[in-house]
Image (spheres, coloured by chain):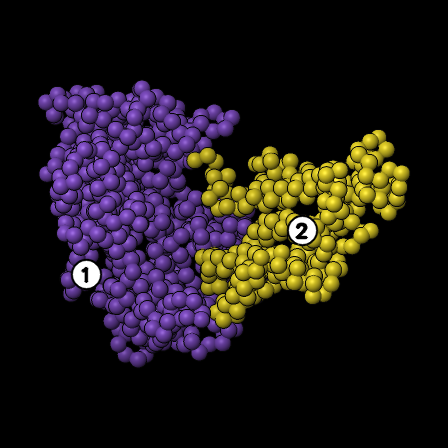
Chain colours: A purple, B yellow
Amino acid sequence: MTGQEQGSQDGGRPPTLEISDLTLSLEGAGADPVDLVKGVSLDISQGQCLGLVGESGAGKSLTAKAIVGLLPRGISVTSGSITVGGQPLTSSPVNWRDIRGVLVGTIFQDPISSLNPVMRIRTQVEEVIKAHLTLSRHERDRRVVELMEAVDLPGHKGFLSRYPHELSGGQQQRVAIAMAIACDPLLLIADEATTALDVRTQAQILKLLRSLVDDMGLSMLLVTHDMGVIAGVADRLAVLYSGRVVERGRTPDVLSNPRHPYTSGLIESCPLDLKGGFRAEVKPIMGTAPIDAELIWDECVYAPRCSRAENKCRSHSPPLEEFGDLHSAACFYPLGDVPGDDLPGTSGKGDTSPLTPSGPVLFATAARGPGSPPQNGEGAEGANDVIVQATGLSVSYREGRTFSYSRKAVPAVQEFDLELRKAETVAVVGESGSGKSTVARALIRLEPNNAVVEGRRQILGADLDELGRGALRGMRRRAQIIFQDPYGSLNPRRKVVDLLMEGPRAHDLESSEPPLDRARDLLERVGLDRSFADRYPHQMSGGQRQRVAIARALSLEPQVLICDEPVSALDVSIQAQILELLASLAEEEGLAFVFITHDLGVMNMLADRVIVMREGKTVETGMVEEVLARPNTRYTRELIQASLVAI
Amino acid sequence: MNFWKTMVTRDRVALVAAAILGLIAVFALIWPFVSPYGPREIHADAALSGPSARFWLGTDDTGRDMVTLLAHGARISLGIAVAAEILAVLSGVPLAMIAGLLGGIVDSIIMRTTDALLGFPGILIGLMVVTLFGASLATLMIAIALMTVPYLIRVVRNAVVVEKQRLYVVSSTALGVKPGTLLRRTILPNIVSPLIVQVSFGLAVAILTEASLGFLGLSVQPPAASWGTLLQVGYSYIRITPWLVLFPGILIFVSVWALNTLGDAGRDVLDPRLRDTVEQGAR
């Protein structure tokens, strides 16, 4: 089937990459092998970009690694075949040195760890050339300069003799790309190559990758969790779920008319509208993906999360079915032709969250209640409503050891002002290094020991720097913080019930109600089953842990939650669930939020006002709609443009 | 304790090491009661005799039974080692916690002092202390404790610093949990395991040091016998009766090996990367 597809497109030329019916299995000690990837078929023809999209554990990275023979120990190809440029990579023993770098170039997520820190840029790039091509010194020099031009880096001596740490993240990734394409490979694999980069850099790198495909005729396999990236770059896409391709087709077709409920859910979970623009709401997919051991192959892998699932889905595994025009999906009850005409698969019945009993539109910025725009707050009488206030807050870090602390501290945040009122959500937006996380901690006096804080910070009118220890502890009840990493913020040694009761115990808020019941009530408030009280953090998924972290913050009935990138470590569908929970807390319980994020889509959904930060300074402030529609500064404009999907 | 269970089930060699240590301990505890000979019982007729049915491992130059001597020596050698480590833990852990928790200048003073101690070869410290205060059980213990305590302080202090910065500790602080409670609930449990590993290495060092000092004649004095003093005595007769150094040597070697192996195995279990692979399966 794949061959015919190609044939019709490409005049019979064999595809650059052809994966057919690939199965990758994990062979456990003594246990039966578990299939992590099953029956995956993909192909890419010359000058084409295929996006491989899926959430963590879907098998997308494993598939990519199988192509270059870098499967982790214990995982092997148990059936199916991979060919690159007509050369089979799975049948006979393969000399991988002739494949990696020559036929297939690979770029990984973290540029700094894929570059050797003690080698100059020129040497690194030359190494690759030397390893595979025999060129004279002169030719080699020319080739290095050519490559630098190809990735839009300066080719002069000064730049080439730098070390990786002297480059920015984007430049490092460009060097990694130059190394990947140094020997003119047929195929370029980009494995989450832009995930670790800031939005603006990400947009530039994606543009570069696309130009390589267009200008040099490279074929590219773009592995990512981000639908936005796919939408901007890939010609075709394949959606992986739990090791299976559930849908594939041309990018515009799939995005505008997804057939598989999961694809549709993934699109709806994305805070970006893939047609350009931001969404006011997301529709999360309920539940979580199965872990390896739970995989059952004689049913539809998505059935447990799918509200369209019927009996047939639980007894038979649906094959990929053609919908014409290269678009196929593995679903017995595919979605209809018109996008959005019926999407019960994403929410509605089977909805496990008690927080969203009503319709598909879960929240919207416009629906935010009283107190959202503080236009009436100009007079002094509004001061009672102010929950968090920062005036001229500056944070800097002293460097070095005790005996040699440098006199001059490195500034992280300068002159930060914030006035947060009841039931209001303010987003603090910026790229990495903008000081936004420093702000989050400094607002409630949780900055690290080596930080020097100037300016005033108040909670409910009390100046935190003037409070004694006891009073500070009391004040902390009012303002709680949620961190990005749900793995690190919960003590792995303690049960959920203890984690949830830690706050009340510390404040002697023991009531007549038994602690277990209180913990269970809290769990219910964040949409978790009451039975979770007995679990340990490692027995929960990332999204569940983040819910527990939120419940923990709520245990003291705070008036403001400071959220430091609370969803950026989570998978897209889980991210949408958590956003929905936070929005409902804002709406129904009147909590105020300080929302630290790098994601303008997330900001747009939750926040009333926004503070844009860059390198520690406040660049722009205003109402979210205002700022998005009419940004005042060039920086904000660039951020917005880079965030939007360019189709 | 889960830590030990994981360690021993994962690592067969560690199991063997633990078994050997157990055997040596049982031997040291039980044998003096079972033995037909006393530790000072002299058999002039059989001095310097080789292994036989009467004296399983032979006799020393005064005709004392080697097996009995080794058992009593084990009591002294292992006793000094254990006592020295207890001393090191009691003095080192509080210092390390103070350094780690307070940070700043206090941390610097404590840590630079331990660095200075580490600068001296261990045996030199031992020699200094023993020559200054005379060879007695107490000075031996202090000398050995002084040698192992810097390593212990380093390990525990670093564990405290790492723990202190963990997100869940910050998050508990945000909830208003008192520092004392935090120390008890999160920091202490997390330093126990690295502490056990370090103590295991420390015991090995202590046994070796006691043996070296004993060999130099600076440990317990005859007729009392430690493994080290037995080595010293045997060394004079190494050409005639090599087993006099052989048997104490084997015991020292085996117990040091076992303690180091246990420490290594413990460290493997503690290594977060390895721990992850244990928790998540082979993935």
Q: Which mark is residue A159?
A: none
Which chain is mark 1 on? A
Return the residue at label 1. A636
Tell me residue A197's x, y (percent). 26, 51
- What residue appears at the point 86 percent right and 47 percent down from the top-left corner? B40
Disc 2 and disc 1 in contact, CB within 8 angstroms: no
The answer to whether A505 is drawn above or below residue B28 in the figure is below
Residue type (three-letter) at the residue carrying disc 2: Ser
> How packed is label 2: few (under 14 Cα within 10 Å), some, or many (20 or more)?
many
The answer to whether B12 is drawn above or below residue A497 in the figure is above
Q: Are marks 2 and 1 on the same chain?
A: no
Q: Secondary structure at mark 1?
A: helix
Q: Answer with left or right where residue A108 lies relative to residue A353.
A: left
Return the residue at label 2. B212
**In the picture, residue A349 is in which quadrant?**
top left
> B18 or A57, which lies in front?
B18
Q: Secondary structure at mark 2?
A: helix
Q: Answer with left or right where residue A160 lies relative to residue B200.
A: left
- Total marks shown come to 2
**In the picture, residue A91 is in which quadrant?**
top left
- What residue appears at the point 39 percent right and 40 percent down from the top-left corner? A288
Which chain is mark 2 on? B
Q: Answer with left or right where residue B60 lies relative to residue A348.
A: right
Tell me residue A76's x, y (percent). 38, 27
> A37 or A306, which lies in front?
A37
